[in-house]
Image: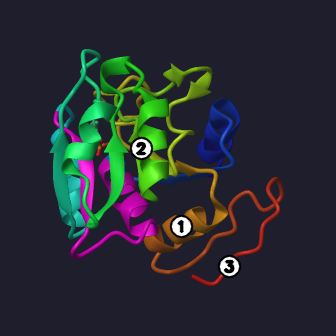
Amino acid sequence: AAELERMMSQDLQVPYVLGVTSCTAALVVALKALGIGYGDKVIVPAVTFIATAGAVISANAVPVFVDADESLNMDPNDLERVMDEDVKAIITVPILGAACDMDGIMSFAKKHGIAVIEDVAQSSGVKYKGKAQGTIGDINVFSFQMNKILTSGEGGAVTTSDPRLFERAVRYHDQGLYRPHFRDTYDFEPQDI
Ligand SMILES: *Cc1c(COP(=O)(O)O)cnc(C)c1O
């Protein structure tokens, strides 16, 4: 896993990568790292694989659906319709290799102070304006399951540029323990969470 994490970090140009057992597991880890739970809502696209919404339910939150635009991805213009004070995050999914409108989604999230998760399960390697999908959102997830573009039979990963979210993700996936990933490359001190 350490070698995979290192290679993904270099290829995608993202500082923190955590290998996990599947993208569904990665989604739950990402939601937990963000502190999402009871009473929270998470916006998901109407067109996606069921795991995107299922992971939200596994984290005890409620998925709310927004419509697709002509790319079949989340339409940023439909986000306002479902927005309320319980919405804490957006999961956006580049479908079948088509990049999402990340500028529209990120600026909506910033305006409302909510987090963005990119679910890149179907689109490993896809870029949006020169940046890899899975490096733009606050915390992001990949799949290496046998139906995906890049497969190892089974597996997944979480990526982030935020050391605090990374630490929370590592601790959630490892019974509260913190393995000091990338200590040699990226110098950061574990923080209290
Ligand atoms: C396949 C898929 C998942 C789940 O991936 P697993 O690695 O099988 O858990 C999640 N989200 C999307 C969009 C997918 O296509």
Earlier along the polypeptide chain: callout 3 or callout 1? 1
- Mark number for residue 108? 2
Q: Amino acid at mark 3?
A: Gln
Label 1 belongs to which residue? 170
Mark 3 lies on a secondary structure that is loop
- Mark number for residue 191? 3
Q: Is residue 29 magenta?
A: yes
Specify whether 180 is left or right of 19: right
Specify whether 167 is left or right of 55: right
Q: Amino acid at mark 2?
A: Phe
> Where residue 37 appears, x then y in whole percent?
28, 73
Residue sitting at 46 percent across and 51 percent down? 111
Q: Quadrant of residue 170?
A: bottom right
Mark 2 surroundings: few (<14), some (14-19) or many (≥20) residues within 10 A: some
Split into quadrants, the picture shows ligand 1 in the one at: top left
> Where residue 88 appears, x then y in whole percent?
34, 62
Mark 1 lies on a secondary structure that is helix
Query: Of residues 20 and 62, which is closer to you in this image?
Result: 62
Mark 3 surroundings: few (<14), some (14-19) or many (≥20) residues within 10 A: few
Label 2 beta carbon less than 8 Å to ligand 1: no
Q: What color scheme is it?
A: rainbow
Q: In this picture, which residue range is highlighted in magenta?
A: 24-46
Residue sitting at 25 percent across and 60 percent down? 84
Residue 53 seen by the camera:
yes
Mark 1 surroundings: few (<14), some (14-19) or many (≥20) residues within 10 A: many
Q: Is residue 133 magenta?
A: no
Q: Quadrant of residue 50?
A: top left
Do the residues bearing badges 3 and 1 touch, measured as CB atoms within 8 Å? no
